[in-house]
């Protein structure tokens, strides 16, 4: 696909159409790399996106109980002092 390089202030840039942005999940920030004489543009991943909503749903369902005790009964806390 060929796209024109356009003037943006004192710089130059390219425009990506809405379909490409949606197809590749490109938001406000991209990761730009130079690899073997090529410019590679990748969307920035958000690894924890949606976690807050999921945690709230779990809490609302009462499905957020610990799978094991957070303190072991035989733990010797004196050795940590």
Image (cartoon, grey):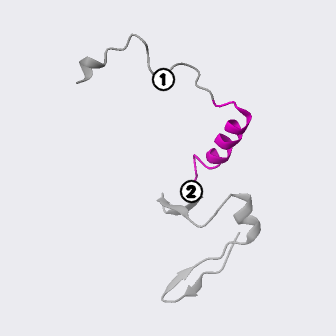
Q: Is residue 73 left or right of residue 26?
A: left
Q: Which residues are magenta?
A: 43-64
Q: Is residue 69 left or right of residue 62?
A: left
Specify the quadrant of the image occupied by residue 28: bottom right
Say if mark 2 contacts mark 1, CB within 8 Å.
no
Nearer mark to the viewer, of 2 and 1: 1
54 in relation to 24, above or below: above
- Is 9 or 39 nearer to us in this picture? 9
Secondary structure of residue under mark 2: loop
Residue 8 pos. (x, y %):
55, 86
Specify the quadrant of the image occupied by residue 42: bottom right
Seen at 71% across and 69% down, the residue is 1
Q: Residue furthest right?
A: 19
- Is 36 or 22 nearer to us in this picture? 22
Secondary structure of residue under mark 1: loop
Q: Residue furthest top?
A: 74
Specify the quadrant of the image occupied by residue 60: top right
Separation (CA) of disc 2 from disc 1: 34 Å
Q: Residues within 10 Å of mark 2 (few under 14, many from 20)?
A: some
**Residue 44 has which mark?**
2
Seen at 74% across and 70% down, the residue is 18
Seen at 60% across and 58% down, the residue is 43
Image quarter of the C terminus: top left
- Is 52 or 27 nearer to us in this picture? 52
Residue 55 within the segment the image draws in magenta:
yes
37 in relation to 62, above or below: below
Residue 29 within the segment the image draws in magenta:
no
Residue 14 pos. (x, y %):
61, 77
Q: Is residue 23 left or right of residue 74?
A: right
Residue bearing mark 1? 70
Seen at 69% across and 30% down, the residue is 63
Q: Residues within 10 Å of mark 1 (few under 14, many from 20)?
A: few
């Amino acid at each position: 696909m060929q796209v024109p390089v356009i003037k943006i202030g004192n710089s130059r840039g390219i425009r990506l159409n809405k379909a490409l942005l949606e197809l590749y999940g490109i938001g406000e920030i991209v990761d730009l790399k130079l690899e073997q004489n090529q410019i590679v543009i990748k969307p920035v991943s958000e690894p924890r996106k949606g976690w807050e909503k999921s945690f709230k749903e779990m809490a609302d369902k009462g499905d957020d109980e610990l799978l094991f005790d957070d303190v072991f009964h035989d733990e010797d806390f004196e050795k940590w002092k």
